[in-house]
Amino acid sequence: MSTLCTVMPTAGLDFLTFLAATVLVIPIFKSVKASPVLGFLFSGLILEKLGLFRNIEQVQKLSELGVLFLLFEMGLELSLDRLKGLAKYAFGLGTAQVALTTLAFTLFALPVGNGLGTQILVKVFHANPQLAAIRTLDEAIVIGAALSLSSSAFVLQLLSERGELTTKFGSATLGILLLQDIAVVPFLVLLPVIETTDLEGQSTATLLTLFVPTALQTLGSLALLLLGGRLILRRVFELVAESRSDETFVALCLLTVTGASLLTQRLGFSDTLGAFIAGVLLAETNYRTQVEADIRPFRGMLLGLFFVTTGSSLDLQLFFQQWPIVIALTGGLIATKIGIIGTTAQAFGLSKAEAIRTGFMLSQGGEFAFVLLSLANELKILPMELNRLLIIVVVLSMALTPALAEAGKRFAEAAEGDEASGDLTLSGGEPKDQKDVRPVVICGFGEIGQTVANMLESPFAISLERGKVPYVAFDMSPHRLEAARAAGFNVMYGDATRPQVLRAAGIEYPRAIAVVFSARQGSVNAVKHLHEAFPDVHIFARAIDLNHASELRQAGATTVTTSEQEAGLGLGASLLGDLGANENSLNFLTKALRKQITNHVGEMATEAQSRSPDEQNAPAEQVFVFDSEACNPDEMRRSFLPPSRTAALSRTNASISSGDSRSGESTSQSTDEEDSEAMRKPGTQLLAEAKVNESHQDPKAVKSVSQHSHSSH
């Protein structure tokens, strides 16, 4: 860190100041369930007022990396499956919302210099004409586009906390946010091109001459970039993934973001476009989940720095001077978006109550408004004072998001009554009669993991669920992953022992977890981390031996299966079956052995907790002894009998074939009597008799006995 401060004496100290503010302020906002975005904005405001930033320009340049990572992550989210699932709300409702809201705010500012908005602000709120007047069409469009966007950070956090992401109105909200994220990219790409070209006084033919070749060149360059990236990027990630080096994989993620941004910048496009394209290229690969989890800390830190620098630009003096205008603009922003979204949403299948809730939930400004306004400020599109005023309006509307969400819920209840509101969501926001869609997580997709996945996809599991049991398997072997996906299994590349990876895959809380790693310490660490992250989720773990099973139980595994013991049970059952034991006996014996092994492992885990660390590191050799006397005597005696129904059925069929209808009844009755008598016999005697009975039923045995009797005569 001293080297950092020597090379960049002011920027290094400013970054230290930012880290200290993050550590102090963000936990406070988290404790009151407020968005970290507000915490970062508040930190920037306070740090600027205290004069603790020494070189804000250098900090702003560093914070621009946060925007690149945000766009990269946004590209990662644009997988085909997600687009298909939200297509109706994203490309239908989302497109209508962005277009209509941008048009409404733009028309509100027109005609240039004397728009309706300008007249209201000047005449009603006595605003300064120089502040309220819009000078150019570009200025009006930028303002309209910036204010049409909503806050993904605030809205998604609220929906997640209330459990409403899976509701109909939650899906509609998510679809609109997704389209807004896509729509901001053309603005970021085209705005610098338009502003660097002199369009005044140009004819239509001249404009076409200027833009058509540029557009074709742009599309051609992007096509080559996408094709080359698809072929090269996937192969590079495969090579790095095979090395099993976490550090190298993280370095490749960072290189992908910064390298793609630099490449598009050299081609004449914006650096944000490169980051977005890199994310899109990786969205359809097997590595998306792990990449998203690895870059999230960097994205969060650098984007937080961006919000801090945005907060430092908040002008409190301007707010106190122009507070009537700020309140008016904030109210107008919220009312306009509620009206447009609430009206449009009903045309796309939402009820009146759902449309109202969606409108209130998305009525604030968003994070990308800061990005657009910052870019417009750099390009000198907006006056400095107007830019600062709009940032204040966006921040204030974002701070009102929780209150707006609650107000939307109240208005929705009033619109359709308590019954309609009850149909919309249950307590906690969960839809009625919705089955548990949480997936089972399989950590590792070797032979055991494949067996578990096959069982979850079996007809028996489907009959339990009235549909397929959802599951997601994770593995770190690229070749195994490719083969598994080709076979139709739902497998992702990633370290499932990290809760961040599960959340990046969209798994907030799994239904159950199976840890089937072959590495001893790796599986123990996995169970420990997963149990800490999801304490109420049942964890099923595979153990190598009894000592390993004891360690897994201590780490938090709910159920432990010892692979060597299971192999022994399977081998022993096959051996006894070949020697003549019946199926009931084998089922009883394996069940009793499993139960005693499980109890023995629990006793070992309890005993291990009382030992010293040195003793735990060198566990004693364990020998398991089956206690047959601990078994239930009645169950044990019953286990030696062959199934009475099968015996009765075979005897009845024999009686029917001989024409004696009464013999079937007597046979059935005698079978019950024989079973009752057999229940009183010792197990060894029953086993011997069972062998004799089986020999009599075997045609070969009957033939040999007959031959023996003839020879004796």
Image: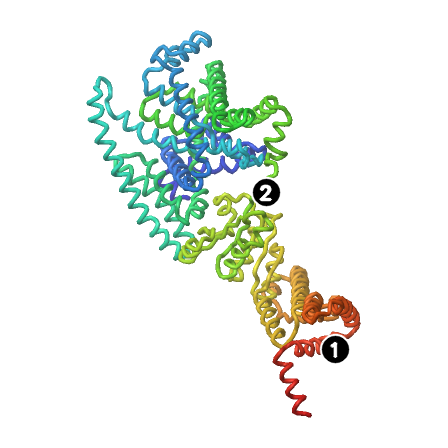
* Residue 617 locus on image (x, y percent): 58, 64
- Residue 147 in percent (x, y) is at 42, 23
| Nearer to us in this view, 68 or 128 | 68
Q: Position of residue 178 (x, y in %)?
A: 44, 34
Residue 685: mark:
1
State which tag comes first along the sequence, 1 or 2.
2
Q: CA distance from mark 1 to mark 2?
A: 52 Å
Instruction: Give the amino acid at mark 2.
Output: Lys
Q: Is residue 263 above or below residue 491?
A: above
Q: Quadrant of residue 433?
A: top right
In the picture provided, is 624 more to the left or to the right than 189?
right
Q: Is residue 631 visible?
A: no
Which three-letter amino acid code belongs to the residue tagged 1? Gln
Q: Quadrant of the N terminus?
A: top left
Q: Is residue 492 left or right of residue 159?
A: left
Q: Which quadrant of the structure image shows residue 296? A: top left
On the rendered image, what quadrant is the C terminus found in?
A: bottom right
Callout 1: SS: helix
- Residue identified by numbered label 2: 435
- For this orientation, the residue located farthest to the top is 123
